[in-house]
Every structure is written in structure tokens, then in C-alpha cells.
């Protein structure tokens, strides 16, 4: 189960995972849905499973970005205090304006290389973005199933 979830979060297609596990695509899809793994949409925001919904995130936490359809790393909460410390940043009270905290994130991009098709930070694949908490999903519940989030 952990291998199927990890491979899905790493960018593998359900059919590839099924072939590697010698199981049907329906079996793998059921695992993905049952464990509360966020789905990858095409060009639109997707709803996050209930298990992923959260309002607070810690710096360095691996999360799911509903906007960018992939894993991301929390870099910094854009609190009023943090913004006041940084020159050049316009002070915005995100909780008052949008009803949600905002975070700077590093979106891990999928890259093609000789070692396979994976999401990676080892070669710098990714970009910085700002996203509201309600568009980010916690993945910590997947650790109950043996998923090592550092392998994503």
C-alpha cells in the first residue's frame, strides 16, 4: 500500500503502478482513494480529501498543492510579523482579507532525467509560489500507512 501511494505522489500513473505491483488499475485506484491521497487535476483546482484539510502548517512540512497538482514544501508563513520584518514586502493581513493564512511554498516539479520520471528537489526542479492554506493539504495522515514523505 505504501509503495503504491508513494509512487502515485511521485508522479507515476496508476497504470504504471498497477503493472509494477501485478494488480489491476482498479485495485490501485481503490488504494489511492481509500487512503485519502489528493487527486491530480488537469488545469483546475481540485478538492482535497477530508484527511488533508488543515489551517496551519509548519516550515519544512511536505504538503499537497491543489493549485499546482503536486507536492510542495512549506517555506514560510506570511504572518503580519514576518511581513513587517522584510523590507519590500507589502503588509497584507491574509486572514482578514481571505479568511486563511498564506504560505510561501516550494512547488516540487516533475522533471525528466536518466534516472526516471520523478518529482525532485535534488536537481532543483521546482519554483517558489505563495498559496493560501485552504489550497494546501497535509499529507501526514499517509504516514499511518507507512508512506515516507521524504521519498516523494
Image: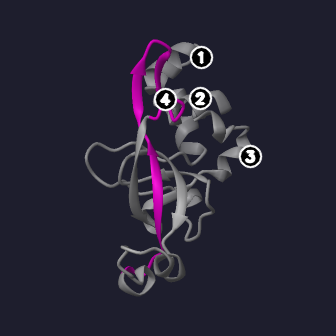
Residues shaded magenta: 98-124
Quadrant of res 138: bottom right
- Residue at image position (37%, 80%) is 98
- Disc 2 from disc 1: Cα separation: 8 Å
- Residue 2 sits in quarter: top right
Q: In terms of secondary structure, where does tag 4 sit?
A: loop
Q: Is residue 41 above or below residue 52?
A: above
Magenta stretch containing residue 105, yes or no? yes
Q: Residues within 10 Å of mark 1 (few under 14, many from 20)?
A: some
Q: Earlier in the sequence, mark 3 or mark 4?
A: 4
**Contact, mark 4 vs mark 2 (Cβ under 8 Å):** no
Q: SS at mark 3?
A: helix
* Alpha carbon separation for disc pair 4 and 2: 24 Å
User: Badge 3 is on which residue?
Assistant: 144
Determine the CA span between mark 4 and mark 1. 28 Å
Quadrant showing the N terminus? top right
Contact? badges 2 and 1 (CB < 8 Å)? yes
Q: Which mark is residue 21?
A: 1
Secondary element under disc 1, as helix, strand or loop, is helix
Q: Which residue is mark 2?
A: 4
**Mark found first going from the N terminus, 4 or 1:** 1
**Is residue 106 located in the magenta-colored stretch of the structure?**
yes
For marks 4 and 2 on the same chain, the one whose residue lies earlier in the sequence = 2
Horizontal and vertical percent position of residue 27: 54, 28
Give the answer, above or below, for where 43 lies relative to 58: above
Tag 2: Cα neighbours inside 10 Å, few (<14), some, or many (≥20)?
many
Which of the numbered marks, if any, corresponds to residue 123? 4
Amino acid at each position: 500500500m505504501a509503495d503504491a501511494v508513494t509512487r502515485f505522489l511521485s508522479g507515476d500513473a496508476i497504470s504504471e503502478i498497477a503493472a509494477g505491483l501485478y494488480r489491476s488499475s482498479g485495485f490501485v485506484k481503490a488504494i489511492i482513494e481509500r487512503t485519502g491521497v489528493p487527486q491530480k487535476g488537469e488545469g483546475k483546482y481540485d478538492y482535497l480529501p477530508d484527511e488533508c484539510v488543515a489551517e496551519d502548517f509548519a516550515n519544512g512540512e511536505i504538503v499537497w498543492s491543489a493549485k499546482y497538482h503536486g507536492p510542495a514544501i512549506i517555506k514560510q508563513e506570511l504572518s503580519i510579523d514576518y511581513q513587517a520584518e522584510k523590507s519590500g514586502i507589502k503588509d497584507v493581513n491574509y486572514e482578514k482579507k481571505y479568511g486563511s493564512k498564506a504560505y510561501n511554498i516550494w512547488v516540487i516539479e516533475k522533471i525528466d532525467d536518466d534516472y526516471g520520471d520523478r518529482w525532485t528537489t535534488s536537481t532543483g526542479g521546482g519554483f517558489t509560489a505563495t498559496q493560501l492554506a485552504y489550497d494546501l493539504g497535509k499529507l501526514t495522515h499517509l504516514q499511518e500507512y507507512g508512506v515516507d514523505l521524504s521519498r516523494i
